[in-house]
Structure formats: C-alpha cells, structure tokens
C-alpha cells in the first residue's frame, strides 16, 4: 500500500471520528474537498478502508464482563470449531495463535451466569479439547485499530 502523509492524516482523523465531514477533513488535512473524496475512494477500492461502523459502549449494552479464552482444538477440526464459536453472539473475535493454545477467543457476557453458560456451551463444543478462561478486570486501552504507520 502506497500511503503518503496526507493519506495517513486522513485515516487518523477518520479513526478519531468516522462521521467527520469531507469539508472538515479537507480543512484538518490541508487539501481540497475533492481530493479528500478521491483519496477516500481510492483507499476503499484498495481494500484499505473496509467499511464504517458504530462503536458501542459494552457496559451500556449490558455486557458487564469481557472474557479471553485460550482453546486447544482437536487436530483437523480447527476451522469447523472456530466457525461454530464465532457464530455465538457474545463472541466478538476469534484468532489462530501460536504458543500453548490453538485459538484465542474474545467475548462479552452479561454476568456470571452468562459466563457459566458460555463456558459450558461454547468453550466445550465437540472438538475443543481444553479451554482456559480469563476474566478482564479492567480495560486500560481498547481501540479498534492502531494508527496508520508512518513509513516515510
């Protein structure tokens, strides 16, 4: 991806506020409004910008606990098991990882009973040989994405 300083500045501003107008982006970055539109379209076409979304406050939605679970998955079952885990509405991320676990799962639950249900239904699906669950005590930082790298 060939990004210049203006592209990176546009992305940083949009990560800060995805609802920012093109006019405000043009002022902030110091380029013409038409150039903003062209650059954004180009980054969308390149697949760099995949979409736009709403960021919800989990606690306001009733999700009081964040869970991280390491899973060992039976050989040859990884894709099937991960797809079934990802289908649960409480799960917001599933990763293949290196190290002691085959997969890491991030989920949000409403309370201890919901955590108990997640642990006994999702983390014990056929194909999961072992799970290790962590409850997040405090969120220090949680952003959707890091800022665009400065490659120059």
Image: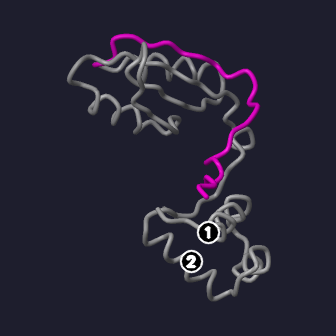
Colouring scheme, one of rainbow, by chain, secondary structure, one colour: one colour
Q: Which residue is mark 1?
A: 7
Q: From the viewer's perspective, tell me whether residue 129 is left or right of residue 21.
A: left
Give the distance between the C-alpha atoms of the residues marked 1 and 2, in whole angstroms: 7 Å
- Secondary structure under badge 2? helix
Q: How many marks?
A: 2
Residue that appears at 73% across and 36% down:
141
The percent position of residue 72, horizontal first and vertical second, equals: 37, 15
Main SS, magenta region, reads loop
Q: From the viewer's perspective, tell me whether residue 100 is left or right of residue 34.
A: left
Q: Is residue 72 above or below residue 9?
A: above
Q: Is residue 142 above or below residue 71?
A: below
Q: Which residues are magenta?
A: 127-152
Near mark 1 (Cα within 10 A), the count class, few <14, some 14-19 or many ≥20, is: some
Contact? badges 1 and 2 (CB < 8 Å): yes
Near mark 2 (Cα within 10 A), the count class, few <14, some 14-19 or many ≥20, is: some
Residue that appears at 56% across and 75% down:
40
Give the number of the disc on residue 39: 2
Quadrant of the image for the C terminus?
bottom right
- Secondary structure under badge 1? helix
Q: Is residue 50 above or below residue 30?
A: above
């Amino acid at each position: 991806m060939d990004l210049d300083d203006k592209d990176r500045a546009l992305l940083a501003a949009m990560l800060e506020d995805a609802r920012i107008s093109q006019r405000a982006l043009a002022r902030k970055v110091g380029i013409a409004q038409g150039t903003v539109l062209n650059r954004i379209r180009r980054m969308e076409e390149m697949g760099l910008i995949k979409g736009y979304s709403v960021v919800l406050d989990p606690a306001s939605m009733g999700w009081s606990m964040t869970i991280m679970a390491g899973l060992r998955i039976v050989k040859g079952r990884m894709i099937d098991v991960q797809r079934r885990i990802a289908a649960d509405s409480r799960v917001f991320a599933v990763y293949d990882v290196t190290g002691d676990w085959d997969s890491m799962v991030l989920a949000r639950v409403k309370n201890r009973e919901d955590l108990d249900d997640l642990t006994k239904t999702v983390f014990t699906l056929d194909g999961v040989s072992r799970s290790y669950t962590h409850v997040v005590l405090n969120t220090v930082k949680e952003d959707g994405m890091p800022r665009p790298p400065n490659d120059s």
